[in-house]
Structure formats: C-alpha cells, structure tokens
Image: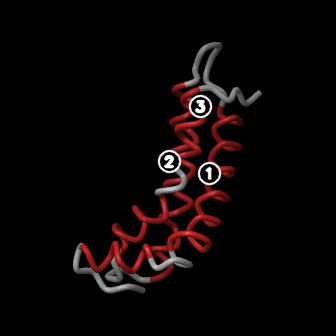
Amino acid sequence: MIAFNLATVLSLLTSLVIPGVSALLAGGKVPNNVAGFLTPLLSIASGFCAAWANDVHGYDWRAGLVTGLLNYGIAVASHFGMWRGTGIEARLLALFNRPAA
C-alpha cells in the first residue's frame, strides 16, 4: 500500500527536477541511448528511496516500484511540458556551457 506521507510527496516533487538533472548529467556529450536511461534510472531510484524512507512495517519494494513509475510519468510529462516546452532546459544547459541535444 502506498502511503502519501512526506517522503512520498518529496519523491514526487523531486520528479519535477529529474529532467533537468538528466540534461545536466548527459550534457550533449553522451549518446542518446545512454541519456535516455538517466530519467527512468533516477525516477526508479527516487521511488525506491521514498519506499525506504517510508519503512515503518518493513521495506515494500512494490511500493517503491509503483512510486518510481509514477515519478517517471511525472518526469516525462514535465520534460515535454515544462522543461523543453518553455525553453528552460536550453537555458539551463547554456548556463553550464553545455550544448543542447
């Protein structure tokens, strides 16, 4: 059962910045297939960390997986809707002198 407490809410809010972190880590210097794995990897890791932080009655890996998949959906939606759609991603990469993909 997924409990929406502080750790889960922070994990879901973290998924809003995962596309920016992925863009900074990839920075246009890695192949697209490697950069494509960063967003789901960071999302799933965030979900499992939230499940670990919610560990009250024992670790529930299924809750971590579901939270990670929710994080991935939010990260993809925010990437195309907010980061790329408004040009924030290009400005973020320009700030750190990295070419946009």
Other residues around mark 3 within 10 Å, as few (<14) / some (14–19) / many (≥20): many
Indicate the position of residue 99 as horizontal and vertical percent values.
31, 86
Looking at this view, is 33 or 51 the one in front?
A: 51
Residues at circles 2 and 1 in contact by the CB criterion of under 8 Å = yes
Is 87 rendered above or below residue 83?
A: below
Q: Which residue is mark 3?
A: 51
Q: Which three-letter amino acid code belongs to the residue tagged 1?
A: Asn
Q: Quadrant of residue 12?
A: top right
Looking at this view, is 44 or 7 the one in front?
A: 7
Q: Quadrant of residue 93?
A: bottom left
Q: CA distance from mark 1 to mark 3?
A: 12 Å
Which label's residue is closer to the chain start, 2 or 3?
Answer: 2
Q: Which part of the image, by quadrant, shows the N terminus?
A: top right
What residue is shown at x 72% (from left), y 30% (from top)? Answer: 2
Q: Which residue is mark 2?
A: 14
Q: Which part of the image, by quadrant, shows the C terminus?
A: bottom left
Q: Which residue is mark 1?
A: 71
Indicate the position of residue 53 as horizontal and vertical percent values.
52, 26
